[in-house]
Amino acid sequence: MNSQLRHTVLPSGFKASGVCAHIKKSAKLDLALLYSERPCVAAGMFTTNMVKAAPVEACIKILKGNKPVRAIVANSGNANCMTGARGSKDALTTAQAVASELALEPYEVLVSSTGIIGKFLPMEKIVAAVPHLVSSLSQEKLKSAAEAIMTTDTFAKIVTNSIKIGGKKVSFAGIAKGAGMIAPNMKHATMLAYVLTDAAISKKALDKAVEEGVTSSFNSITIDGCMSTNDSAVVLANAAAGNKLISVAGRDYDVFAKALKMVCLELAKMIVRDAEGATKFIEITVRGVKNSHEAKRLALSVANSNLFKCAMFGSDPNWGRIAAALGAVDSGLVWQKMDIALNGQPVFRKGKPVIFKNDGFLKGHLIEVDVDLNNGKACERVYTCDLSYEYVRINAEYN
């Protein structure tokens, strides 16, 4: 896998672009386009928030139709959420403008937005920028597209990967945005993620692979415990690699699903590393649990604990905050059997505190939390960050 930026990172048959439509107050890029020269099988997962942005509703409707998709257009600086009938019309108008310029049907264009909630899109600016957005399409413009979907992000998040399936090279390229308002819970994941691949794969197989990939990546991260109204993860596959069609079972599917999962996980980790004001990247593993669902709930309870996150910001090995967060979950936990370790240092073992020397072993950027309930075989891992003064400042000033 390659997470370094290269001039040409797109799979065969794909192009990308990013331009400034002046949606943001700054002159930064804020309108992105991903385009396939061939029809794509598409799969996606979206926020389970009861308040869904207009473009999310539009994407869900299109993907339910099981028709080929050719493009994704996304803007930053405005979420187009809680904007009523006008917001829905604006999402459609955006798709129509791109479709017209590319000689496509509107249902072949997915739409995404991210930014401030409750404001109408400046449609005259977006429509005016579409011709330049389309004319700028290139195999070498994925970085521009990645930058155009950024809000409070500090760097463009791009991951590429390539594998062999049936002797054919199959490539992946993924981009994502997200630094705050991150606690995705995407059903069958503010955070946006798009992965493009030239694999030939059936719709049923892609749906399955995307659900598996998102579950272990984007749905396993949390920055602040706040679920966005716009969370979206979409994968397009255009079959340009020429491999034998991948079905829902067999070695080819396993190889594809593993590669997609790796791309999604690397993008998800980038989001956590870029968390607003974060100074620590925290990996929480909960093992020895009866089932994976319970293990995930326990891990996320720790990851979403503000007290725990504040302790990690202060490099304080306060295992009591971990234990309290675990105990808040209705589970089979028996604290007298539990083990807790921080960065490999046991701090609690079989119901008793461990005496240890605090020589600043949590002062580094990476913190690994390992919890063993000694009550089963299931194990789950989630990723989060600390809670800093800077996080509060950024979100107090976000408007």
Image (tube, rainbow, N blue to C red):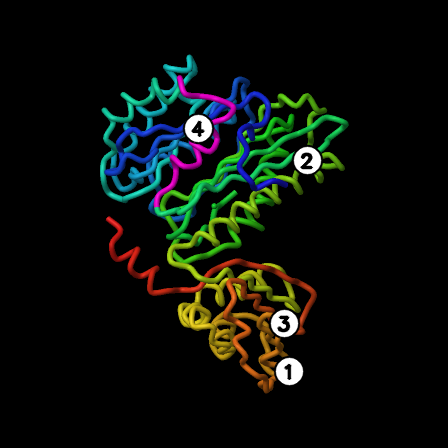
Label 3 – label 4 distance at C-alpha: 44 Å
- Please provide percent x and percent y for residue 39: 54, 20
Label located before the other in sequence (1 or 3)? 3
- Please provide percent x and percent y for residue 205: 64, 34
Label 1 secondary element: loop
Label located before the other in sequence (1 or 4)? 4
Q: Nearer the viewer, residue 8 or 207?
A: 8
Label located before the other in sequence (2 or 1)? 2
- Please provide percent x and percent y for residue 253: 70, 36
The span shown in magenta is 135-151
Label 3 secondary element: loop
Q: Which residue is mark 4?
A: 72
Marks 1 and 4 close (CB-CB < 8 Å): no
Near mark 1 (Cα within 10 A), the count class, few <14, some 14-19 or many ≥20, is some
As for residue 3 lying within the magenta part, the answer is no
Label 1 – label 3 distance at C-alpha: 16 Å
Check residue 248 in the rendering and tell me which mark sits there, or answer none.
2
Q: Nearer the viewer, residue 259 or 314?
A: 314
Label 1 – label 4 distance at C-alpha: 52 Å
Disc 3 marks which amino acid?
Gly
Label 3 – label 2 distance at C-alpha: 39 Å
Tell which tag, 4 or 2, sits nearer the viewer.
4
- Please provide percent x and percent y for residue 9: 56, 30
Check residue 365 in the rendering and tell me which mark sits there, or answer none.
none
Q: Which residue is mark 1?
A: 350
Disc 1 marks which amino acid?
Lys
Q: Which residue is mark 3?
A: 344
